[in-house]
Image: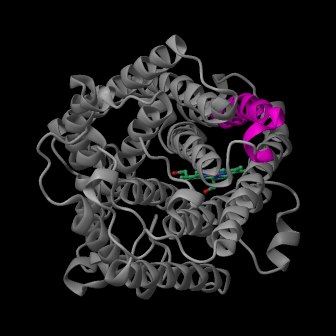
Amino acid sequence: MVGVQVNAIGQGGRSVAILALMALGACALTLLGGMAASIVYTSWEPSLRSSGLTLQHLRPIHESFAFAWVFLGGVTVVHAWLISLGGPFCGAERMRFRAMIALWLTAGAGIIVSLLAGRFTGREYAGYHPAFGAMILTGWALFAWNFFARAGFSLRGKPVYVWMWTAAIPLFAITFLEANAYTLEWISRRPLRDIAIQWKANGVMVGSFNLLAYGSMMWIAGKMRGNDSYAHSTTGFLLFAVGIINTFTNYGHHTFHLPQTAWVHWVSFLVSMIEVILLAKVTIDLWNLRRKAPPAPDLAVPARFASSVTLWTCLMLASAIAMSVPPVNSLIHGTHIVTAHAMGTMIGIDSMILWCAMSWAARQLAGPAHAAVRDPWMRRAVTALDHLLIVFLTLFAIRGASAGLARQLGPSAPDLSRFVAAFPALMVAVGFTFASVALWMVARWMGAFVRALRTADAEAPPTASEGTPVPDSDRVAV
Ligand code: HEM
């Protein structure tokens, strides 16, 4: 199979490197935003406030860029696949790609400046001005255009990752429009409808980025093994089918406080459980397949991340089942256990998949000898991330449990006041260490992608394949 290498596909490698740099930039902003948000919990909060920053500023920055990171990471992998399919973008495709990048960069810069200036909407996951939402959506339409122009609309015989991406692209567009439906007065004036639509939209949005990430995992696992057969397996397609159903039902978790019938919540619960069980099975299957053929040294970092995905999917499955037991659910509702769960799934599953993708793409673009690919400290850093994340989330979970127990048992609740007092300092210490390790890795990959861009620029004259369609015989079979 053809790899995505700058030297092999010139301009195509540039497109992937540019997107990877944007995704990693969003990841770095998420980590920095999380670090700043965690200071709000400590006695340094007044100093932060005096510099004009509060949780109202920092939470939407942290969340908006967390979403941007996962979407951009997935879009990077989809572009790597598109380019391995048909060669570098040329003509109208290249124009659309450039316009998409310009729109997303403008939106990203606008979001950060406007949120720091205090222009927030107060909406969960859509805290920025809708004008930036319009730019994101227009960029997405251009991405969809390039995707369907190359991939086509027929799914017959295609591997499951193509099904996942084909579904994720329109899903995001529809749900993004729904998330912004509050700008219409006849919705914002009806609070119940507004909350129901908002959480239904957020649920589908998470579902659509999960599909992008699962598809990325499937494609990259096949590339690393040199065998795409698992992407045609029944388990893979079952995960896709349940993932799709879950995009439409998982909002039930967020609307327990609305007067809805109980079966909405039950359907939501059952479908989510089936999805996470299937995801655990897929990651364990892929892990077993990898054990049969250990990775080459230059693939050790992505392989290590893939093991982390397996570990975290199983841990999140266990915690999701525990959280869904009705008495436990009423205990944890509205506590930091929910924050731990939201961050745990987004870091442990989506981010681990995408860090795996980034380390794989860095190897493809900067070459297997690049320091960011071979350095044994990169592998050790993945182990450090796993351990730090377990401690970080456990701290949130114990803090949440203490609040839940105090609420339910009153004075007879166990006395955790010493832990509660120590929580901010512990959380900041562990969170900052976690973020520093992750930022160090992000910086190494960014260095690799910048080098790949320079190498592509130094390629002169352009290769014969640049700007011309790739003959069918040279295309990658997908
Ligand atoms: C890639 C890494 C990260 C991702 C994807 C991520 C994602 C998220 C998400 C989705 C939430 C909202 C959870 C909810 O619904 O309540 C959240 C909250 C939070 N995150 Fe992170 N996070 C990351 C890293 C970090 C780090 C490294 C720190 C600390 C150093 C941090 C600190 C926080 C805090 C303090 C909150 C709660 C804010 C509040 O009280 O409302 N995050 N994060």
Q: Is residue 286 left or right of residue 414?
A: left
Q: Residue at x 58, y 49 (%)?
A: 361
Q: Position of residue 403 (x, y in %)?
A: 62, 37
Front one among 198 and 271: 271
Residue drawn at 54 percent across, 85 percent down: 106
Which residue appears at 52% of the width and 70% of the height? 463
Q: How many marks?
A: 0
Q: Which residues are magenta?
A: 370-399
Please check the rendered image and state whether residue 440 is part of the magenta-colored stretch, yes or no. no
Q: Could you tell me if residue 398 is visible in this image?
A: no
Q: Magenta-highlighted stretch: main secondary structure?
A: helix
Picture coordinates of residue 334 (x, y %)? 50, 45
Quick one: quadrant of the N terminus? top left
Q: Position of residue 233 (x, y in %)?
A: 25, 25
251 w.r.t. 270: above or below:
below
**Residue 84 in view of the camera:** yes
Query: Can you tell which quarter of the image residue 204 is in?
Result: bottom left
Q: Is residue 391 magenta?
A: yes
Quadrant placement of the C terminus: top left
Relative to 232, is 154 on the left or the right? left
